[in-house]
Structures are given as C-alpha cells and as structure tokens.
Image (cartoon, helix red, strand yellow):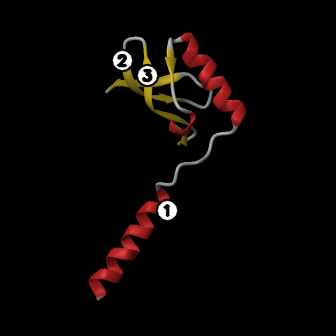
Amino acid sequence: MKRLATLAIVLAATTTGAVAQEVDEATVGKINAMLTEMQCEVDPVNIEADDGGYELDDVFCADGQYDIKLDANLAVTEKRKE
C-alpha cells in the first residue's frame, strides 16, 4: 500500500509540472502567419508556451514534419525534423 501511495505522489508531482501553458489567440495568429510564410502549418493545440518561448509539435511543412522551438520574439531557435 505504501508503494501505491508513493507512486501516486510521484505521478502527481511530475504531471503538474508538465502541464502546458495556454497561448493567447493573438500569439497563435502571429505564429500561424509566420508558419504560412515558411510553407508550414500546425494545429493550434500543438502550440505550447515553454521557458519564455514556444514549442510547436508536429508542424507540417512542404518538405516534411518538424518540431520547432521559438523564442519570445517568435524567432526560430530550433527546427528538428521528425
């Protein structure tokens, strides 16, 4: 029983820190406009606020699928092909 309680506490502690922060509609619009210029698109549910910037999961571009990280100014800091 102690193991189960410990597991529950550990899971609760790790999942609360992993909750994605919502991104406001204006920022989502700016991100989508930027992606359109790059010939890319992303489902808005895959845009997360992350460490002062943004993380975009499953971005579909003309040349493939990517995970993209943006800084607070919406500049691409990382683009990793999946």
In three-dimensional space, the C-alpha distance between marks 2 and 1, rounded to whole angstroms, equals 32 Å
Q: Are marks 3 and 1 in contact (CB under 8 Å)?
A: no
The picture places residue 21, in percent across and down from the top left corner, at 58, 48
* Callout 2: SS: strand
Q: Real-space Cα distance between discs 2 and 3?
A: 6 Å
Q: Quadrant of the C terminus?
A: top left
Give the residue drawn at x 48%, y 58%.
17
Depth check: 14 or 59 in front?
Answer: 59
Q: Residue furthest right?
A: 26
Q: In this figure, which residue is indicated by the disc labeled 1?
A: 16
Residue placed under numbered mark 3 in the picture = 60
Q: Disc 2 vs disc 1: Cβ atoms closer than 8 Å?
A: no
**What residue occupies the far bottom of the structure in this picture?**
1
Q: Quadrant of residue 23?
A: top right
Tell me the element at label 3.
Answer: strand
Query: Closer to the observer: label 3 or label 1?
Result: 3
Amino acid beneath label 1: Thr
**Precedes in sequence: disc 2 or disc 1:** 1
Question: Measured along the vertical axis of the image, is residue 33 above or below residue 14?
Answer: above
Q: Mark 3 or mark 1: which comes first in sequence?
A: 1
Q: Residue at x 35, y 82 (%)?
A: 5
Instruction: Look at the picture and state if 14 lies above or below 59.
Output: below
Disc 2 crowd, CA 10 A, few/some/many (<14, 14-19, 20+) = few
Q: Is residue 65 left or right of residue 72?
A: left
SS state under label 1: helix
Q: Nearer the viewer, residue 36 or 79?
A: 36
Q: Residue 64 bears which disc, if any?
A: 2
On screen, residue 62 versus residue 33, left or right, reads left
What type is the residue that disc 3 sits on?
Phe
Q: Residues within 10 Å of mark 1 (few under 14, many from 20)?
A: few
